[in-house]
Amino acid sequence: MKVIEKIKDYRNLRAEIDRLKIELEELQDASLKAVQYREKLSPTNKITSAVEEQVIKTEKKISEIKCTIRCKERELRKIDNALTVLDEREVDVLKLKYIEGKSWETVCYKLDRSYSRAKQIERKALEKIGHLI
């Protein structure tokens, strides 16, 4: 089911966004360091094409990473938004089972519900948020 897979991916999305932000910082820092060095200019004050190409590649990579971060953050916001329409029990079932990856036995124990009741809560929650994610 598409909704369940997206909820399961919640933690990975957060970790991936953090990794991309670190990569972005590294690229930006490297770009700043490269700019601080004085390049030898030709008599016409033209920067060598290798340097120019590297700057263009770096800027393109920075732009791609920023776009990827925005897309992944939107996915997280969709999940967070969907969870706001659920009651506390429904959120707890989905978070425990799919975000934290707990077994149904653990979910039932923590929520003090039977397996059939926990599954019923899960089904109701998924029906509520299916169109939001």
Image: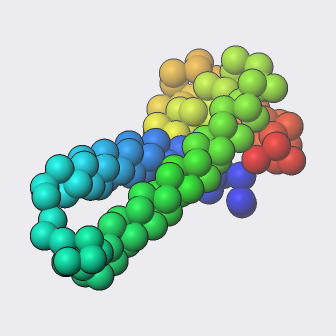
Looking at the rendered structure, the number of numbered marks drawn on it comes to 0
Could you tell me if residue 30 is visible in this image? Answer: no
User: At x 49% / y 59%, what residue is drawn?
Assistant: 63
Quarter of the image for the N terminus: give it.
Answer: bottom right
Residue most extreme to the bottom:
49
Of 68 and 77, the residue lying toward us: 68
Q: Quadrant of residue 88?
A: top right
User: At x 61% / y 25%, what residue is drawn?
Assistant: 92
Of 118 and 42, the residue lying toward us: 42
Measuring from the top left, give residue 117's x and y in whole percent. Answer: 73, 31
Q: Is residue 66 above or below residue 107?
A: below
Measuring from the top left, give residue 99's x and y in whole percent. Answer: 52, 40
Measuring from the top left, give residue 4's x and y in whole percent. Answer: 66, 51
User: At x 15% / y 65%, what residue is drawn?
Assistant: 39
Measuring from the top left, give residue 43's x and y in whole percent. Answer: 20, 77
Residue 39 located left or right of residue 63: left
Residue 60 located left or right of residue 34: right
Task: Name the colouring of the figure.
Answer: rainbow
Of 65 and 90, the residue lying toward us: 65
Q: Is residue 67 above or below residue 54?
A: above
Q: Quadrant of residue 112?
A: top right
Of 2 and 107, the residue lying toward us: 2
Could you tell me if residue 125 is visible in this image? Answer: yes
User: At x 13% / y 55%, what residue is drawn?
Assistant: 37
Residue 108 located left or right of residue 24: right
